[in-house]
Amino acid sequence: MIKMVFEYISPLLDGIVDIFTQGGIITYIILFIGIYGLVISIRKIAYLRKISKVDTTEIFGVVTASMERGGAVEALKQINNFKNPISKIISETLKIGYKNKTEVEESMEQIFIVEVAKMTKGLSTIKTITELAPFLGLIGTVIGIWMTFKSLGVHPDSAAMAEGIYVALTTTIMGLLVAIVLLPIYTYIQGLIEAEMDKIELATKMTNWGFAVVKVRVDSNVECALEALQKAEGVVNTRLISDPYANIKVSFKPSMLDKSISNIILEKCNVNAEITESKLKQ
């Protein structure tokens, strides 16, 4: 059985070796860029599959459950374990109150730019190799045919002409082979990236918080802090509370918060404030 397999494969291997020995330097160039493109493709697929293992709804389920237990801080701790673009973007949306809406949006945009750059890195190289390989093969063929006819001008021989054309065509075969292998891989990678982009868009919509409640601790000038919060843009309700870790409870609309909670108090009352608990709702 092994002998039969070897007898079948042996001529094939001889043919491949013959292609490289007869095709010349252009064949080796095509092979090199083909292997390079394949390595980039495999690494890119591995990365994209790694970051897409966890679905958006699963991450959001963790956020919702954590929010009930310990608020935004607990949710941040839990989703930091995922370490993918979606979790990073959701993490920024959980910081509303600690930051104002503009700061959160800018942070989300920066993360989006960085993550898209990571996902698309190397994609243009794969595309270039896919498009370039057949042209390199064609150049090799043209050069080979030109050299064949040049030699036949001195010693005309139909058998030599046929052999010369065969040798010249090997570079075209190699170029087309590289393109045929890499093109479907390139399309597959594009599909993975588009799927991840759709997840990011869904995550952005799902974390468009409509309402937030935070507990704030102010060490001094509490009345001034309360008044400053009541007059702030986006704040719906404020009241004093009796809590071991906080003395003010604030309800606000995240989409209208133009300053962070601590900055509102600091600017009006010149005292520091700390958010001890934050809960967000859709």
Image (cartoon, rainbow, N blue to C red):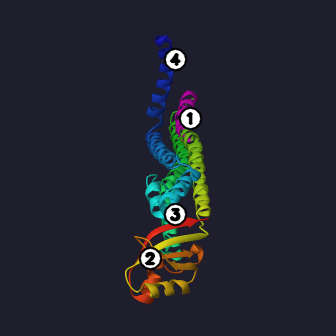
Write down the residue under mark 1: 165
- Horizontally, residue 244 falls left or right of residue 230, namely left
User: How many other residues sit within 10 Å of disc 2, few (<14), some (14-19) or many (≥20)?
Assistant: some
Dot 3: what SS?
Answer: helix
Q: Which label sits on residue 131?
A: none
Write down the residue under mark 3: 112
Question: Which mark is first along the chain, 1 or 2?
Answer: 1
State which mark lies toward you, 2 or 1.
2
Question: Which mark is first along the chain, 4 or 1?
Answer: 4
Report the span colored magenta: 158-175
As shown in the figure, which amino acid type bears the numbered disc 1? Ile
Dots 2 and 3: beta carbons under 8 Å? Answer: no
Question: Which mark is first along the chain, 3 or 4?
Answer: 4
The Cα–Cα distance between marks 2 and 1, rounded to whole angstroms, is: 88 Å
Write down the residue under mark 4: 8
Dot 2: what SS?
Answer: loop
- Tell which of 154 and 49 is nearer to you: 49
Q: Is residue 195 visible?
A: yes
Looking at the rendered image, the quarter that the C terminus falls into is: bottom right
User: How many other residues sit within 10 Å of disc 4, few (<14), some (14-19) or many (≥20)?
Assistant: few
Name the residue at the front extreme: 242
Question: Which mark is first along the chain, 1 or 3?
Answer: 3
- Residue visible at 47% across and 55% down in the picture: 79
Classify 33 as above or below 73: above
